[in-house]
Amino acid sequence: MKTKIYLAALALLSLMACQEKKTTEVLASSQWEAQRPFANIDIPFEDYEIDADRDTVLALPQGGAFYFKGGALRNENGDRISGKVSLKYRIFHDAPSAFLAAMPMSYEAQGEKRYMATAGMFELRAEQNGSKLKMAEAMKITTPSFQKEGNYSFFHLKDEDGKWEYLDQEYEIVENKSKQKALKKVNYKAQSLLKMPLEAKYFCFDYSAILDATYNNNYGKIYENRENPLVGQKAQQYGLSWLNSQCYKYIDYQGSKQPAAMMVWKRLSGGRFPAWAKDKDFDALDLQPIRGNIYQLTLNSNDGTEEWSGRIEAVMPLMQLYRYSPQSWAKNYEKNMAEIEVEMQRLSQEADLFRSFEISDFGIYNYDRFLKWDEALPLVAQFEIEGGELPASFRLDKVFCFPLNEASLIDLPARDWNKLRISPDRPLRFLAVLPNDQVALFDLDDFAAIDWSEIKDRPADQPYTIVLRAQPGQIKTAEEVQQLFAPKMAAR
């Protein structure tokens, strides 16, 4: 009798164990997984190795930092972890990167679905020997952000269902001063470059300065060539014009005294110079400093009946301009502009500011604000694909919407097509993923061609057809996806 009872008890325990194991397997398999639009394309992680027992400040890409606390990692059983640990980090700073990684960009609360625009989304994970780790205490992380405007809140993506939860905590904002300084330097360099021939705004005060620069103050040659038309023709090759006004003042230019008459000037205001300022009669000239290299210039005609006034800027000594031929200036301009373009591209990848926050676990986090559609028109949309060779079994059941100049992605399954809101002041792009890693687009040119009177006058329940055109070729890289949005869609 006892044997039977024991056997029954063992069978019951075995059954309970099997049920518990099955329940655990079901829970494990119910974890949310991103359904990427292109199976072979993802946003890669940056991998780091740290010592789990030591405090570490880990520098992250684009200026971020993770302040790791030694001894604060646990495995899934709650046991403290020691030794080497692998940290994985990646950032989604624009709509295309969120799209590629299939990051959700909507928030649901109290039955209302709202769409988000990100100021910086990131994912941080920790592993040891392939097993996921968790935090035993909160740690600080500073992440780059490309959006200054807007009231952003902090959210955490729940691993179990892929829904955002709002984290009601304050975060610190620090501006990227090194980027601001670098941008000022690059912009100053770009403004100081001269493109040949010069624009009509560049001039010097009188023709005698042109002669001095042409013959490098060789007075014998200056006298011999004062009527030589080649002198004026060379000045015109530079694009340089001149007035007929003598100026005997000196100005401060880059720490030294320079004769104002021997400078290249740029007209900033006052409109074009009148014809009398260039005739053979010398005109009266008054030059007053405003700030830096900017001066107030006043011209009075020789007969005293006319006046011109405006702001001008000292650009460079005339001798410096004539030191190189117009062809050399043009070549140098192209070289320097190419260098500036490279630097601007590099700086565009740097954050405008940094946001700091304490996180209590690893996962996906997001600084977001909600898009406002209050003034947009409600629209029942019907999306169709034009072009491409689609299989007969293909059915379009989802499109993605990208608002212009927003780091935002709106996932539109077919059930939500009757809830679209649209406005002529809020340009939208629509994208559909087709079989064989192809895409179809409704681009900004298509949006600009919308007949808004047709939308306003149609019955509320009558569908409006939006046609997406199939694009040639397959999408094989993340760069190709970025190219779909460049240069018309701004990320930061």
Image: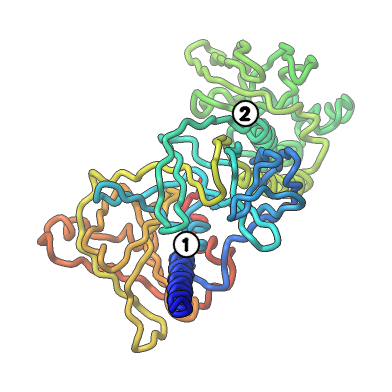
Q: Amino acid at mark 1?
A: Ala
Farthest residue toward the left?
A: 459
Q: Is residue 63 visible?
A: no
Say which label, 1 or 2, has the lower sequence index: 1
Q: Amino acid at mark 2?
A: Lys
Q: Is residue 422 visible?
A: yes
Q: Label 1, label 2: how many angstroms apart (C-alpha)? A: 52 Å
Farthest residue toward the front?
A: 1
Disc 1 vs disc 2: which is toward the camera? 1
Nearest the viewer among 451 and 384 is: 384
* Relative horizontal placement of residue 97, taking residue 445 as reference (left or right): right
Residue drawn where x is 39% and y is 48% of the image = 116
Dividing the picture into quadrants, the one containing residue 47 is: bottom right
Secondary structure of the residue carrying numbered label 1: loop
Which disc is residue 102 wearing? 1
How far from the left and from the top, in percent, is residue 286?
Answer: 61, 11
Q: Which residue is mark 2?
A: 266
How far from the left and from the top, in percent, is residue 229?
Answer: 73, 39
Secondary structure of the residue carrying numbered label 2: strand
